[in-house]
Amino acid sequence: MSSILSIRSVTKFYGRIRALNQVSFEVPPGSVFGVLGPNGSGKTTLLGIVMDVLKATDGTYSWFGEPPSEKQRARIGTLLETPNFYHYLSGERNLRIAAAIKGRGMEDIPRVLEMVRLTERKDSKFSTYSLGMKQRLAIGSCMLGNPSVLVFDEPTNGLDPAGIAETRDTIRHLASEGKTIVLASHLLDEVEKVCTHVAILQRGELLMAGDVREVLMNEDMVELGVPAGLEGRLQEALTAWPGVRQVRRRDGLMEVFFQQGIVPDTGELNRFCFEKGVVLNHLQLRKRSLESKFMEITKEINQ
Amino acid sequence: MLNLLRIEWMKFKNYRTFWILVGIIVLAIPGVNYAVYSIVSAVNSKDKSPGAPILNLFGFPDGWHTVCYVSSMLFIMQAILIITLTTNEFTFKTHRQNIIDGWSRSAFISVKFAEVFLLSVLSTLTVLLTVLAFGYLAGTGEAHVSVWQGSRFLFFYFVQVISYSMIAFVIAVLIKRSGLAIGLFLIYMIVEQVVMGIITNLLKLPAGQYLPEESTDRLIPFPGLHLMSQLEWEHRIPGYLTAAAIYLIIYCVVTGRYFLKSDL
């Protein structure tokens, strides 16, 4: 099957400010695709363009392998930026309008209200909702008609910790059902926890895009704890270990990084340390966080 | 289009401000006319000297002209209603959401045009009922006068109300904020009169009468006074109607292109 969303050389200028520059990537079917970048990197602009609320200065995009149209948008559940509803109407009446525009039946409304825990407040005006409730209603609106593709722009904005965890679970659950999810976030941790694919944007430039495992490939790191006074000796010895790229001290622990393609064998490493006369009191294999990878990529590009 | 209008109806039917403004329009049209009718009746009953003219401004056929003229003073209410309904979409950013959820940009702007049209029809129907009610109340005084004689003023009223409504709509789409848009609409009404005065009186050019609001205002001149230049007025009606039609096309093209091409 062709890509769900295909973005080709999209450029966007706001006056003289270039918000996006020649951005291209593909969102494969069934993926949870994270669009990652700091505030102002162009994530919302990009999603606004593919939802036709913003006009690209240059470039094209397609949904489901076809030229963009309103019929495709009706098949996609989208939460873009802030929840946009009629303040003077109740939550349920707002969902009725959304369902009617999407061409969905009204019978799905009780299900989504229950899903986002707003059944009891369905008759209250939207203006009386808390920020979290507004966000939940927007997520509920996305779920109307159980769409196979969802687009979420900062979906955990305004949610409390429980709401954030709940939204992540919902996204994971939706992904497990085979839905394709495009998730824009400046919270690297959020993307890392749920995404299968990632595109990294910075100041409108696409720095990297692809499978999360590929983007984070060879980012395994071993954390070692050693008795005080032995750090120097161990650091020197470890530098000679085959494939070690870098050894550094951090927060009382030693972090060992490896060259590309090297998978560290922690048992061998433990034995090596012991042979060098150092008994480890802590040894853990860690996946490097997307955050550190992101910092590294943006740093490399800026240099 | 019917489905689009059905969704628009879902937006308004539980909106209190919408009903208040519609209620004001529907009640104010007969209300203001009743006030004028009472004054005219008082004048007629007071001045019973021999040879004094009897003003039957609300009877047929003059009632069409009088009621349409008096009712046209309430266009500001219609403008406020249209500006409120339109700018609400921008304030709540629901215009974006409607597009995201599956409307095309052209569907959105088309249904807004349809709304302006239907609200103008509603206002015109209210005027029609008011004309008929006051006409039967005041009587014709002449047996041979048809009830529908003079009804072309109702068409002129419709042209006038839809023109004012579209000016309000254009301002609402371009300005996006309700208070500012209402203020600008009022300022435009004054500015156009000043410009018209300069063009007509100072520059002595006929172009002043073809300005956007003035061209439709002149379709319904002040009742009674136009009789002196009845022929001249009759002669200019096609020009006023053509100007109104051209302006309406311009309003549609400007708002349509703006909404289709710009960032929302």
Image: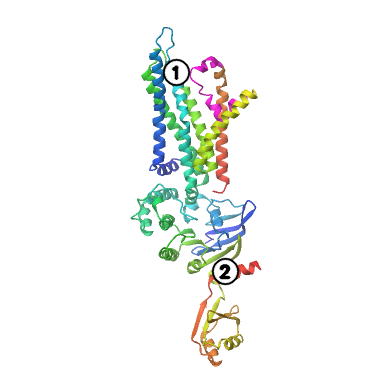
Magenta residue span: B206-231
Furthest residue to the left?
A: A120
Residue B207 visible, this orientation: no
Query: Disc 1 designates what residue?
Result: B62
Q: Amino acid at mark 2?
A: Phe
Separation of residues labelled 1 and 2 (CA atoms): 79 Å
Q: Position of residue A283 (x, y in %)?
A: 50, 83
Q: Position of residue A249 (x, y in %)?
A: 56, 81
The residue positioned 40% from the left and 33% from the top of the image is B24
Q: Residues within 10 Å of mark 1 (few under 14, many from 20)?
A: many
For the residues labelled 1 and 2, say whether their Cβ atoms are less than 8 Å apart: no
**Dominant secondary structure of the magenta stretch?**
helix
Q: Is residue B224 magenta?
A: yes
Q: Is residue B151 magenta?
A: no
The residue positioned 55% from the left and 19% from the top of the image is B233
Q: Position of residue A51 (x, y in %)?
A: 52, 53
Q: Position of residue B14 (x, y in %)?
A: 38, 43
Q: Secondary structure at mark 1?
A: helix
**The numbered mark 1 sits on a residue in which chain?**
B
Look at the picture and state if A211 lies above or below B203: below
Q: Secondary structure at mark 2?
A: helix
The residue positioned 49% from the left and 25% from the top of the image is B156
Between residue A266 and residue B201, name the one nearer to us.
B201
